[in-house]
Amino acid sequence: MAKIGRNDPCFCGSGKKFKKCCLGSRTAAPAGPAIPSVKMEVEKIQESARAGKAAVLALGVFVLFSTTSGDAWLLEVTDMDAIQVAKDGEKLPVQIEENPETIEINWTHKFDVKNKKFVLTSYKDKSEEIRDDYPGHTILSTVKKIRSRIPPELISTIHLDNEEESQPQAG
């Protein structure tokens, strides 16, 4: 389970710590969230998938994408984690616990882009799947852009270690 804590880089991409960036903005404006919600962005990408629209969106350390075939995924670029949020135009249930200090997601896959092809490896059974129809090149360039904005010494601090992370994730 990945968590983004108050001392981690802000997922808005500013390079500042979350507590010095959007966390303060959110507290100062209780009428509505000052920062994008991962849950809200997942809902948007699910809607794009339902409509058969291809889209790629960067949100801090996350990449969300949908395909014309109705699939959609949420990716995390520091550990290359992934979870499918829509399949064949249908929304899939996604466990995301989000509060002003942390974001927790039960990732189901690791992802990579090899030879411009999107590669998924399941945590559950270690099976590998190559998706030629996913926008591998666009995803890779988005991942590189996000990673270039995060200082290397902060990448390792984005995730909090806990015993649950070392066990296979339920899919």
Image (tube, rainbow, N blue to C red):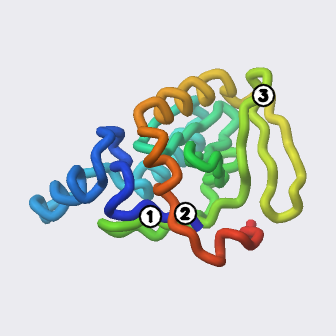
Name the one closer to the observer, 59 or 84.
59
- Tell me which residue sits at (49%, 47%) in the image: 155
**Mark 3 — residue?**
114
Q: Which residue is mark 1?
A: 103
Q: Which residue is mark 2?
A: 2
Q: CA gap, disc 1 to disc 2?
A: 7 Å
Name the outermost residue toward the left: 28
Tell me which amino acid carries mark 3: Lys
- Calculate the distance from the C-alpha at mark 3 to the C-alpha at mark 1: 28 Å
Q: Residue at x 78, y 38 (%)?
A: 119
**Up-down: is 101 above or below 78?**
below
Q: Are marks 2 and 3 in contact (CB under 8 Å)?
A: no
What is the tally of numbered marks visible in this picture? 3
Distance from the alpha carbon under mark 2 to that under mark 3? 24 Å
Q: Residues within 10 Å of mark 3 (few under 14, many from 20)?
A: few
Tell me, for residue 167, which label it has, or none. none
User: Is residue 71 shown above or below 114?
Assistant: below
Q: Residue at x 85, y 43 (%)?
A: 129
Q: Earlier in the sequence, mark 2 or mark 3?
A: 2
Q: Nearer the viewer, residue 70 or 171?
A: 171
Residue 81: image x %, image y %? 64, 51
Whether pointer 1 and pointer 2 mark residues with C-beta atoms closer than 8 Å, the reply is yes
Residue type pointed to by label 2: Ala
As drawn, the residue found furthest toward the bottom would be 163
Q: Locate residue 171, reporting x and y percent.
A: 74, 66
Secondary-structure class at tag 3: strand
Residue at left offset 52%, top offset 32%: 56
- Residue 126 placement (x, y as % from top left): 87, 56
